[in-house]
Image (cartoon, rainbow, N blue to C red):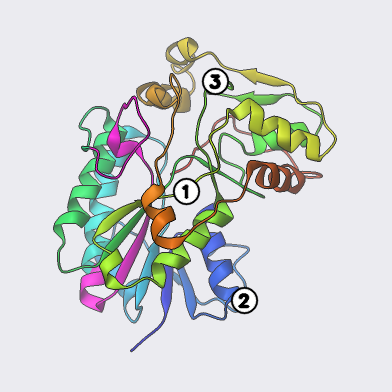
Amino acid sequence: MSDEILVLGYGAVGRAVAAQLLAEGRHVRVAQRPRPADLPAAVPFMACDVLDAASVAAAIAGAAQVVVAIGFAYDGNLWARTWPQAMANMLAGCRAAGARMVFVDNLYMYGAQTEPLREDMALSRVGKKPAARAAVTRLWQAARDVKVAALRAPDFYGPGVTLTHLGDLVFGSIARGKTAQMIVPPDAPHDFAYVPDIARAVLLLLDAPDDDFGQAWHMPCPPIQTPRQIIALGAAAIGARPRIFAVPMWLHGVIGLFMPMLREMREMRFQWDRAYAVDASRFTRRFGFVPTPFAIGAALAARSFVGSAATPVLGAAVAA
């Protein structure tokens, strides 16, 4: 039986997963539309368009497991079309190959909540992006003949992770002696997942028995802090004094007329107008997982931007 693992999508999380698999000497290959410029020569690559069923089937063929780490542009109308189609294609490909799927997901499908997010919360139909992720959830949950485990993570950050709320426009700007730019409130308590931790969690699921599939798992995070507190930890590690400029949430509608990213953020304001916490106790109990403290993760993230060039577009993307 094949022990090959396909990593579908080579963004921040896909790259970290592939790196950890490669470091362990596992059989890993990568698929996405363009070949990644930084893909190690030892990792086989296959071009794949997740919106084309034949392309997805060809990429998955021969794999024992598939790690789905794809993302689409941050556009609710686009998500409504592309996410269900992509998931249907990936489920069909896994079904044909007899492969298991570990789906790196987000937490949008719960919509607005007033308590820490749990896996048993109802799926939301409010908002284009939450509804799209809820629709995708229903698809894999209904596919009883494909073994799927969803790892749901909040916004993430980490070394070299640029397009995130704690990415280039925050730690990168501070590392270059500039003011950090945020499109979300810096003083709202908010869970963040460390990208290398997400990769570790994915590998635990890849090695888990079938009994751990057919369900969603929440990604463990360090004790919740505000972005300002996390930024201070990273800035201290590089000897910088952080200055932060944040776009007020009430301005998103106005500025969104000219910046699509801010327009798309409006329906997600529930992530930032209250504490946004994740209950990952099930995963912690099952796998004994200990997340990287912010004191370590923020320091490593900030140091990774020292000497880096600036990313030119404000808020080009957030965690998928």
In depth, the one of 177 and 297 nearer the eye is: 297
What's the residue at 19%, 55% (across, down)?
141
Quarter of the image for the C terminus: give it. top left
Q: Quadrant of residue 41?
A: bottom right
Q: Secondary structure at mark 2?
A: loop
Q: What amino acid is found at the position of numbered circle 3 in the picture?
A: Pro
What's the residue at 36%, 86% (across, down)?
2
Asked whether 95 falls inside the magenta stretch, the response is yes
Task: In the rendered structure, find residue 220 and report the number of the disc placed on it.
Answer: 1
Quarter of the image for the N terminus: give it. bottom left
Q: Residues within 10 Å of mark 2 (few under 14, many from 20)?
A: few
Q: What amino acid is found at the position of numbered circle 2 in the picture?
A: Ala
Q: What amino acid is found at the position of numbered circle 1 in the picture?
A: Pro
Q: Which residue is mark 2?
A: 41
Mark 2–mark 1 distance (CA, rounded to whole Å)? 32 Å
Question: Looking at the picture, does residue 85 appear above or below residue 123?
Answer: below
Question: Looking at the picture, does residue 280 appear above or below residue 243?
Answer: below
Q: Quadrant of residue 178?
A: top right
Which stretch appears magenta?
93-121
Total number of numbered labels?
3
Label 3 or label 2, whichever lies nearer to me, is 3
Q: Is residue 123 left or right of residue 281?
A: left
Mark 3–mark 1 distance (CA, rounded to whole Å)? 22 Å
Q: Secondary structure at mark 1?
A: loop
Residue 10 appears in the picture as rendered: no
Task: In the rendered structure, find residue 185 and report the number of the disc placed on it.
Answer: 3
Mark 3–mark 2 distance (CA, rounded to whole Å)? 41 Å
**Mark 3 vs mark 1: which is more N-terminal?**
3
Asked whether 180 falls inside the magenta stretch, the response is no
